[in-house]
Amino acid sequence: WCRRETGFRVANTPFERTEFDETFDIITAWYFIEHCEFPRETMQRIYALLNPGGIFAFSSPSIFGPQFLFDRRTWSERHPEDHRIDFSPSSVKRTLKRMGFRTVIVHAAGVHPDRVVPRVSPFYRPFSLFYGWLAPLLRFSDTIEVYARK
């Protein structure tokens, strides 16, 4: 569909086996890295495919969020078996810097106050306002968005 409707070149092969004959200014990978068999090698390949100054933008579940920290049992039960890596904002930043990325910005992407305080609680509204303000500052969320410059 994508090739036919947009004219974009499309590779219907796993990323690890796809051959590229060019480099890119931006590569995005939304909820992809954690599913790769070898996530570090995949990120190193992405780095190699970026032009100097290129951007790698991706999202991933975060282990610095309410579900992982306050409800580990539920998190473990729901954690997909095919996730090979789990990041926190600090671990993803450290990993990407070691790979050579110069600028790494991490944003809280999944802010869900109801995972801490039930919606029916009289404390939900004030807590959700506070949490909505605090979570982005601390990057405390169940998912993160990452932007890294080569």
Image (cartoon, rainbow, N blue to C red):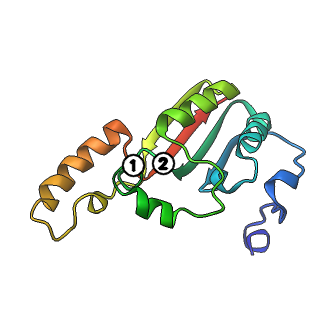
Q: Of the residues shown, which amino acid type is indicated by label 1? A: Gly
Query: Could you tell me which secondary element the residue under label 1 belongs to?
Result: loop
Q: Which residue is mark 2?
A: 62
Q: Nearer the viewer, residue 93 or 115?
A: 115
Q: Of the residues shown, which amino acid type is indicated by label 2? A: Ser
Q: Is residue 37 above or below residue 146?
A: below
Residue at the image point whose x is 39% and y is 49% from the top: 65
Find residue 40 and report its horizontal and vertical position in percent: 72, 40
Q: Is residue 102 above or below residue 8?
A: above
Residue at the image point whose x is 75% and y is 32% from the top: 51
Left or right side of 23 for 98 = left
Find residue 93 and report its horizontal and vertical position in percent: 55, 32
Left or right side of 14 for 111 = left
> Crowdedness of circle 1 by 10 Å Cα count: few (<14), some, many (20+)?
many
Q: CA distance from mark 1 to mark 2?
A: 6 Å
Query: Could you tell me which secondary element the residue under label 2 belongs to?
Result: loop
Q: Which residue is mark 1?
A: 65
> Crowdedness of circle 2 by 10 Å Cα count: few (<14), some, many (20+)?
many
Quadrant of the image for the N terminus? bottom right
Quadrant of the image for the C terminus? top right
Residue at the image point whose x is 78% and y is 65% from the top: 7
Residue positioned most to the left: 122
Left or right side of 3 for 74 = left
